[in-house]
Image (tube, grey):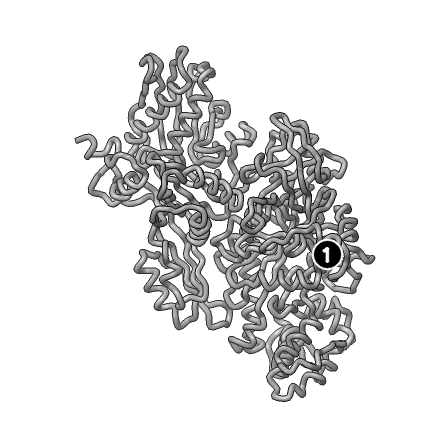
Amino acid sequence: MAGVGMEVVRKVMKTPENIRNVAVIGGTDSGILPLMDGLNRTASPSVSTEDGSRCKKYDVNPMTANLTCLYHKYTPADIPGVETLSAKKEFVINIMDTPGSVDFSAEVDTTLRMTDGAVILVDCISGVTLDTKLVLKQAIRERVKPLLFVNNIDRAITEYKLSQEDLYQTIHSVVEAAKGVVATYSDESGPMGSVQFSPLKGNVLFGSASQGWGVTLGEIAAKQAEKLKVTPSVLLGKLWGDNFYNPSQKKWKNEPSQDFTRAFNIFVLDPVFKLFGASGNAQGSALPDLIESLGATLTLDNNETNDRQKAQEMISQWLPISNSLLTMIVLHLPSPLTAQGYRTEVLLKRQTDAVGTSAIRTCDPKGPLIMFVSKWFQIGQTDIMYAVGRVFSGSIVSGSEIKEPQRNTKVTETSMVIGDNICPVPEVSCGNICAIRGVEQRIAKIGVVTSHSSPVVFNDIRPSVSPVIQLDLDPKNPADAPNLLTELKVLMKLYPILECSIAASGLHILTGTSEHLLMRCKTYLEKQIVLKPTKLHVAYRETITKEPDMLCTAVSPSNKKNETSIKTKPLPNGLCECIEEGFITADQDPIARADYLAKNFGFDANEAERFWSFGPGDNGLNLLYYSSKQVRDQGHVRDSLISGFRWATREGILCEEAMRGVRIEIRYAKWQLSEDSDAVEAIRRAIQGSVIAASPRLMEALSRVEVVCSQDATLAVREILTNRQGRLLEERRVGRTPMSIVSCYIPGEKCLGVTSELGSSAKSVQVAFDHWEIMNGDPLDPESPAAMVAMETRARKGLPSDIPGSHSSSA
């Protein structure tokens, strides 16, 4: 309901029960942009002249997540299968749309942290593809409740000429595939309860975002039940699955039979097919009769002569998507008051005290301000940046000063986002998502704005796709190096998934999730700085394959009296994946972590107190233990030993790539008074020596590539993938459409450029990192392929060509 003023919306925003925070996510060609355009036209609050004078315009970027505030007035209706509300209510729906591409999966990750529900768009022609699976998995991981929208049904009718039965079978296959993904990652006994899709429950929408229509089966049942003289709930049970109806005999069967047609086809698809059929009539003569048969009161533009547009206008009036979708959101997705009760467990780390935890869990408007920021956007070409975040507790007030232990932070502006308008408001209360200014210097990427006296620590956002694609950046003029660093900081705010490291040569290495993302970053930087020619690379990992027979000892470089002895061994298969999925964390209770490792990986259950650190970061995939009381008593250098361990695992001995899957155990340590750097350097050297003795290997990234193409193009697609060392996983048809999906794994840098090479052979291509695999060959043998990769990487980073410990360096 467009036209409602901001003052009405701000009043509703103060009632958490009447707020919904929703992400709109989906895959390539799923139709996110036309959906958001339609919702903004029909459900955005109006901005008065007075309000508009204070608002700022910003360019909505389709390659990033964008926030908008919608208003919906719910009117009670008899919709079967759904627990409806008994009275009229006003709702504010904060919607964040995301790029419909796996290339920008990190935008989905950061958006889901701020929302409680998600609308998953699936193109019925392409089906459930790799990007859809990834966003669904991430939503369930963040305890975000999903809804399903099967989109582009109009294209299946007009472009692909599917019959009603073929279209039903295609839609059915999409719903079943989506249900399969949910069943894989969800737990019906968990705190969210059942999140499974079911058209009969009303959490699945069918329609066309581009044409502005959509409907649930409950709405169809409510519209058609009176004609059949049955209750809506009875008809609803017949609208999905094998239920067949004969209109003339008014009889039902549960199996195909002559003169009996599937109920879904009769009551859902047949009116839509007739609308499109009428639009093809030369005079459009069938349209008035069809309007009457639908029992609808519709208004057509008499000046409109295009019958297809008349049909589109009519169906969007008969089944308006904004009403159907927003009602589905209101009825099926939780309010912040409900969602924060079960999400707090996955949002917060154990360090957060009881007061902060309780304030978030109860969405306490009188509690301390706790706002989580995970998104930034820039106003045009200016330096003005807004932080977008969710207020989990308390209220954030424009102009307020937040006292913190290190310094005070002043919030200079608090704003709502309505379409492409950023509108300042005095205050935003808990449960809402808003934009603020004033914290640019305090938060580098993702962070917390809080007035709470104790630290409020959120869990890190685990990426759905790990960043493994790298871009080397080197300014042509060395004097531009500081400017490059400044612009990189801006980019890492806008795209928090980006990582930047500096090689020994001074080369800046930017790491992201996709070619597309890094090329956008490069284009942005080239507008500011002249860069040397460069190309993309894929990251590697370093690991070991056996436990060496010996201890490796290193002495301190300063006095040669202090020493550290260590032993390395590979971590058991599957342990790294458990760390990545969050089953084992640094924040975990030590006893619980030790029990989990003992039960699942055969570790000693008594090792809980002997664990020191993950590396290279808090969620790193290498573990540091100490083995004796003698080592524990060297506590005065513990922090230095951990720092050295993290340095060694961040920059491996082979080519300074991160290590993966290595357990490092300090067996002996003797330290007298010395510089902390001595301990750091000593353990680093000991780890490097032990790795060389443990049969080190390089690991290469395997990316999963999914190609949606016509059945006629599958042969050409398979040939291109095979030439890139692709390992075919599956080839399947999408429902009863003429489209197929070809999936494979492609190793290392062979995946770079595959989208361009496939070109017109593919309707869409998704490329995403999947897992690591040990490369063939010993990197210490200079003749092996692994050694060549290591030496090329070392040369690119400005390191000596010989690998320490290799046969060539030994010679």
Instruction: Indicate the quadrant where residue 761 lies.
Output: bottom left
Locate the N terminus by quadrant: bottom right
Q: Quadrant of residue 369?
A: top right
Of 181 and 88, nearer the camera is 88
Q: Residues within 10 Å of mark 1 (few under 14, many from 20)?
A: some
Q: Nearer the viewer, residue 208 or 621?
A: 208
Horizontal and vertical percent for residue 768? 44, 52
Left or right of 8? Residue 803 is left
Q: Position of residue 317 (x, y in %)?
A: 71, 72
The answer to whether residue 518 shows anywhere in this view is no
Point 34% across, 57% down: residue: 726
Position above or below: 610 against 387? above
Local SS, label 1: loop
Q: In this picture, is 132 found above or below 593?
A: below
> Residue 7: image x %, image y %?
78, 51
Asked if residue 626 can be seen in this view, the reply is yes
Identify which amino acid the numbered label 1 is placed on. Val
Name the quadrant of the C terminus: top left
* 415 vs 464, nearest the viewer: 415
In-front residue for pair 529/203: 529
Residue at (70, 63) in percent of width and height: 42
**634 sits to left or right of 211:** left
Q: Position of residue 699 (x, y in %)?
A: 34, 42
Residue named by callout 1: 47
Residue at 83% across, 57% down: 87
In the image, farthest residue toward the top? 672
When asked about the image quadrant of residue 41, the answer is bottom right
